[in-house]
Image (tube, rainbow, N blue to C red):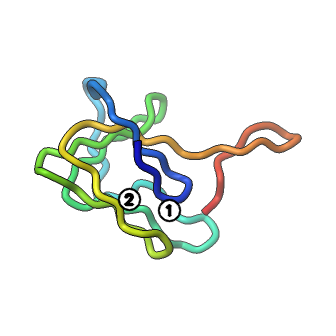
Amino acid sequence: MKRQGDILFVRAKSIPKGLKVKTGGVIAEGEKTGHMHRLVDGTLYEDAKLGMFIEVKSEKASVTHNEHKTITLEKGLYTVKRQREYEPQGWRQVAD
């Protein structure tokens, strides 16, 4: 597992079939700052119900963000998880 701010990258055994490629590499946009978690040199897949996945075909890919240290993802498959927090109204995603 690797983490960058409120985003967690977990190794996956496979990626569900039929997912659409998300162009531009933006994993998440900062709701407060406008800064983005961006994938460089990998393929990003997204499905409204299944979530987001990354495939790194080369030896490594990078995830960049203006306020966080760049992290490296090694060759392989990953599931992308957003951190959540509880409020009296229920669970919500953390705003970066």
- Compared across the picture, whether 6 is left or right of 32 comes to left
Label 2 Cα neighbours within 10 Å, binned few <14 / some 14-19 / many ≥20: some
> Which quarter shows the C terminus?
bottom right
Residue sitting at 26 percent across and 36 percent down?
77
Q: Amino acid at mark 1?
A: Glu
Residue 87 vertical placement versus 5 (above, below): above
Residue 72 placement (x, y as % from top left): 29, 57
The location of residue 75, given as percent across then percent down, is 18, 44
Q: Are the residues flagged by discs 1 and 2 in contact, CB closer than 8 Å? A: yes
The picture quadrant where one finds residue 84 is: top right
Give the residue number, with chain letter if any, for mark 2: 26
Residue at label 1?
29
The residue sitting at the front extreme is 1
- Residue at the location (25% across, 61% down)? 40
As rendered, which of 92 and 6 lies closer to the eye?
6
Residue that appears at 64% across and 70% down: 32
Of residue 1 and residue 91, the one placed in the foreground of this image is: 1
